[in-house]
Image: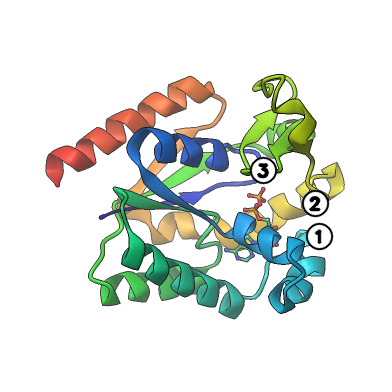
Amino acid sequence: MNILIFLGPAGSGKGTQAQYLKEQFQFAHLSTGDLLRAEVASNSALGQKVKSVIQSGDLVSDDIIIEIIKDRVSSLIKNGDFNGIVFDGFPRTLQQAKSFDHMLTSLNLQLNKAIYFDLTLDESIRRISGRQIDSRNNHVYHKISNPAPADVQPHLVSRNDDEPEKVKHRYMVYQNETEPLISHYDSKLVRIDCMKSIDHIHHTFDDLVQSFQVSA
Ligand code: ADP
């Protein structure tokens, strides 16, 4: 089973590329942000607990996140009919990364690559200010650079943590908490220049997945 993690700030295209891996190569897409927003939307006990943290742009506690991941990974592995798992937005702290290392070892799995989506703060703000999401399936679009087709338009929503001030805050949290993971994953790291086009980055993933299949 192939295991990829996606590290990168808001707007760097993690969700867009995870969707591509799902559609093109039958990877499971596990986004902690999507899982948490679903809890908030359903008004579950967990959702009520994390709602204000998400809105402020801070991180949900490591314990909660690790619990969610363990849960999802074991149900994915039980029902699994896919080529791998993309972890989008996890791990996001050194503690999460260390727990994840243990989790993989205990499941007899190995990380293939940690993908580092490199993007500046200014570009993060520019992109997020045009971000739109299909409320039915979480597909991500951008008003200008990746507009949704006409039939999807009525279903588009914006996230309430996507205001510029909150994006700035999330970027700072990312620099403090998540960037240190770049050296943690040193030998497995693949850097993506997120100023390249979506298609160009798709091709990078085509080559990467090809190399997994060859070496599998
Ligand atoms: P982004 O657009 O910043 O990549 P996500 O959709 O991945 O956002 O996450 C939205 C919010 O959910 C984060 O700002 C944070 O509050 C919470 N969250 C998501 N993943 C994690 C995680 N691994 N650890 C802690 N909090 C998380």
Q: Are circles 2 and 1 on residues that touch, CB within 8 Å?
A: yes
Q: Residue at x 45, y 68 (%)?
A: 97
Q: Is residue 122 visible?
A: no
Q: Indicate if the residue with disc 2 has its beta carbon within 8 Å of ligand 1.
A: yes
48 in relation to 92, above or below: below
Q: Indicate if the residue with disc 3 has its beta carbon within 8 Å of ligand 1.
A: no
Q: Which residue position is annotated with label 1?
A: 55
Q: Earlier in the sequence, mark 2 or mark 1?
A: 1
The quadrant the N terminus occupies is bottom left
* Structural crowding at the residue carrying mark 2, measured as other residues with C-alpha within 10 Å and reported as few (<14), some (14–19) or many (≥20): some
Q: Position of residue 25 (x, y in %)?
A: 33, 37
Name the quadrant containing residue 77: bottom left
What whole-number distance in Å separates the C-alpha atoms at marks 2 and 3? 19 Å
Q: Earlier in the sequence, mark 2 or mark 3?
A: 3
What whole-number distance in Å separates the C-alpha atoms at marks 2 and 1? 5 Å
Q: Which mark is residue 161?
A: 2
Q: Is residue 24 visible?
A: yes
Q: Residue at x 70, y 23 (%)?
A: 151
The image quadrant in which ligand 1 is located? bottom right
Amino acid type for the residue under numbered disc 3: Arg
Name the quadrant containing residue 98: bottom left
Q: Which mark is residue 3?
A: none
137 in relation to 192, above or below: below
Nearer to me, 190 or 78 = 78
Amino acid type for the residue under numbered disc 1: Gln
Amino acid type for the residue under numbered disc 2: Asp
Q: How many marks?
A: 3
